[in-house]
């Protein structure tokens, strides 16, 4: 069990304890913190605290974080769209809505569960029991191509290519507005948001806890109020394209996290697809490149934009 301690400074006086903790670096979501409050795992000045408690300067808060229950990834017979496969690796076209690996709140039904069934356990173990074979990830509501390693040699080789940014990854997206230039790039460091631990944000390059990130973009098509772009990743940070495009005022359509409050709910997530993936095969040395068709949700949205612009 881990225990966190916080001292309330004068500027924190008057705040509700749940809101105060949500703004601190706990690594927990607001709902998780509220659950701990309800379970009596949060104490203020030695007393059990309710979430509505108003704080005073000098209050001492102790948060008990129970040890996480281990999550076991089990094989599940879930259909996969396999673009390529050999004895060392496979390339999968992940659908929108599928989580890559098990985590609290998504214990099964993930890509890893499907891979364990399909590969009969023949996956690289470097990623651990929860992420077998997973070299890189894409968000739940992002569709597109992923490469998966079946053995450790392949996993290491692919990870080394990721580290030196030699893997070719091109995404297609629809973003709000018209970009000022046909092509350009965003070069901004990305780190965990200091105000919302579930989000990422851009920060100055010398900010502790951030990582260098680079996204190049080019215009593919223009619509009334929207632009379709291709994004080439040099780095692969969490939510990189979504954060970078939002930082220049052109958030991805359908993105409820980084986009406008009146999100396009009919998209059921961001209009973002990992379209092209290219890399050197770590065992054979052959360069492989794959391209996937835009999924139905993406093409339907484009047709709607074209029709609305007529």
Image (cartoon, rainbow, N blue to C red):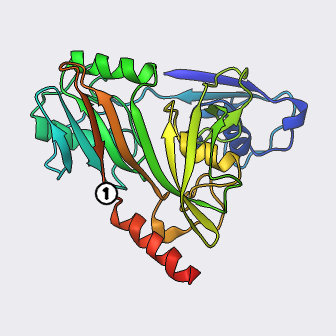
Relative to 220, say whether 225 is above or below: below
Give the residue at x 72% y 23%. Answer: 207
Q: Is residue 250 left or right of residue 232?
A: right
Q: Is residue 231 above or below residue 116?
A: below
- Foreground residue, 191 or 58? 191
Q: Position of residue 147 (x, y in %)?
A: 28, 35
Seen as rendered, the residue at the extreme bottom is 310
Q: Nearer the viewer, residue 189 or 282?
A: 282
Q: Is residue 55 above or below residue 166?
A: below
Which residue is disc 1 drawn over? 293
The residue shown at (56%, 84%) is 310
Residue at 31% x, 54% y: name it. 95
Number of marks in picture = 1
Q: Is residue 230 above or below residue 147?
A: below
Sort mark 1 into few (<14), some (14-19) or many (20+) by Cα contacts within 10 Å. few
Residue that appears at 59% across and 30% down: 213
| Front position in the image: 177 or 68 | 177
List the single residue furthest toward the right: 10
């Amino acid at each position: 069990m881990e225990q966190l301690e916080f001292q309330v400074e004068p500027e924190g006086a008057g705040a509700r304890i749940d809101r105060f903790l949500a703004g601190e670096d706990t690594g927990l979501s607001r709902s998780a913190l509220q659950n701990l409050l309800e379970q009596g795992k949060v104490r203020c000045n030695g007393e059990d605290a309710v979430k509505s408690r108003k704080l005073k300067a000098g209050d001492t808060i102790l948060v008990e974080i129970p040890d996480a229950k281990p999550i076991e990834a089990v094989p599940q017979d879930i259909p996969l769209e396999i673009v390529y496969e050999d004895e060392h690796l496979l390339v999968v076209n992940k659908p929108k809505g599928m989580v890559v690996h098990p985590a609290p709140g998504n214990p099964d039904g993930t890509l890893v569960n499907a891979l364990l069934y399909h590969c009969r356990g023949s996956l690289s173990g470097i990623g651990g029991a929860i992420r077998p074979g997973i070299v890189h990830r894409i968000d739940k509501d992002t569709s597109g191509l992923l490469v998966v390693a079946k053995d450790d040699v392949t996993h290491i080789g692919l990870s080394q290519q990721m580290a030196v940014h030699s893997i070719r990854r091109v995404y297609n997206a629809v973003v709000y507005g018209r970009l000022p230039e046909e092509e350009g790039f965003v070069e901004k460091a990305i780190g965990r948001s200091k105000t919302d631990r579930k989000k990422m944000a851009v920060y100055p390059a010398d900010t502790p806890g951030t990582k260098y990130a680079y996204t190049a973009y080019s215009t593919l098509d223009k619509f009334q109020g929207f632009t379709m772009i291709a994004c080439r990743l040099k780095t692969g940070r969490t939510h990189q394209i979504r954060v970078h495009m939002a930082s220049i005022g052109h958030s991805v359509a359908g993105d409820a996290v980084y986009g406008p409050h009146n999100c396009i709910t009919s998209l059921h997530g961001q209009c973002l697809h990992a379209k092209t993936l290219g890399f050197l095969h770590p065992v054979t040395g052959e360069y492989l490149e794959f391209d996937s068709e835009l999924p139905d949700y993406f093409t339907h949205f484009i047709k709607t934009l074209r029709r609305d612009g007529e």
